[in-house]
Image: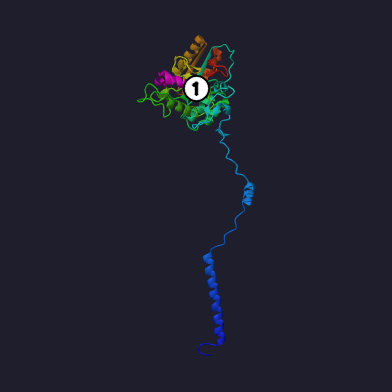
Amino acid sequence: MGEGGSPGWRALAGFWGVVLLALALTAATLAWLGPPTPPPTPVAEAASEAEAAPARPAPEPAAPASIPPGSLSPHVDPALVEPSPDGPLPRIAPDGRAPMRAYARPFDGGDRRPRVALVIGGLGMNASLTEQAIVALPPAVALAFSPYSRFVEPLIDRARERGFETLLALPMESAGFPMMSDPGDRGLLSGLPLGENLSRLEWLLARYPGHVGVVGALGPMRGERFAALAEPFGAVQAALAGRGLLFFDARPGAAAPARAPGRSIDLVVDEPATRPQIEANLAALERLARERGAALGYVGDASPVAVQVIAGWAGGLESRGLVLAPPSALVRLPPPGAPR
């Protein structure tokens, strides 16, 4: 074979060179022109497609806030609560029913015997003592629970199952505050604006709905200083009445509440909290009931001794011609649906 190769091989190489050159030119031309432009959609066709597409539904208006099902105790009437940022607040139902009647323990109003009523306070913070009170005491006494108690709902439910009237112990500024007594971080204080006290009141009431009313707390939350100021104290009473709640003033002999259904207590049973003194105070309560027709005692801080003494005392009350009545039976309740 010669130096330049045979004529046939030269011709073949020239042919493939021309082919490769043509392919390169074609690729360059397509790159310069870019992708083809799609034909425009006719206006009529576009309109028909828009009509055929399903319309997106308008957002529904937000439903009014309500209490989630199952979030309330079975002993709480859903019609007697309303939602709030703090929890379910007691209220008067649209049909006029109020907690002071709905949760009151039944009592024969025709019973003419002298009536003795007792409120047992200081419950909820000590679960075992609270359980002892629920089991040992007669259901005609009322049980008052601290709003600062935690995980107390099962105990309150148990009390309601036995038929007790329950109350919320309301913490208010006492005469010794701030040096000796502290009503807690939600206590009602004389130095706070009225709006802040009413906001605190709502927080307190929202702890455990289903109470017949509230009672002033004893001990460091007794509230003498707060109750001495007519306007904030009156505004709190009005707020309670507006929610259909009773108010029991923990100061013995104080005037009846001016702006809420209720009354003051007549005697503190456990001051001092010794067996002989508790027994003597219960006897004094009986004498007051005979003289006035009714008397209300308050055990401000339940103790095993107080529970034991009261359970024994109550067992013999009828034999002495008196009847143990729930505190609501000592209050003249406004008629259902009366103006608030």
Image mark count: 1
Local secondary structure at mark 1: helix
The answer to whether 313 appears left or right of 54 in the picture is left
> Where residue 340 appears, x then y in whole percent?
53, 19
Closer-to-camera residue (222/290): 222
Whether residue 77 is visible: no
Magenta-colored stretch includes residue 19: no
At 56% from the left edge and 26% from the top edge, which residue is drawn?
80
Q: Quadrant of residue 19?
A: bottom right
Nearer to me, 294 or 227: 227
Q: Is residue 92 left or right of residue 200?
A: right
- Taking the magenta stretch, the answer to whether it contains residue 238 is yes
41 to 176, vertically: above or below: below
Identify which residue is drawn at 53% across, 68% down: 29
Magenta-colored segment: predominant secondary structure: helix
Disc 1 marks a residue whose amino acid type is Leu
**Residue 283 drawn above or below residue 244:** above
**Residue that numbered label 1 is attached to:** 240
Q: Position of residue 9 (x, y in %)?
A: 56, 85
Q: Of residues 329 and 242, which is closer to you in this image?
A: 242
Disc 1 crowd, CA 10 A, few/some/many (<14, 14-19, 20+): many
Find residue 190 and report its horizontal and vertical position in percent.
39, 23
Range of residues picked out in magenta? 223-240
Q: What colouring style does the render use?
A: rainbow
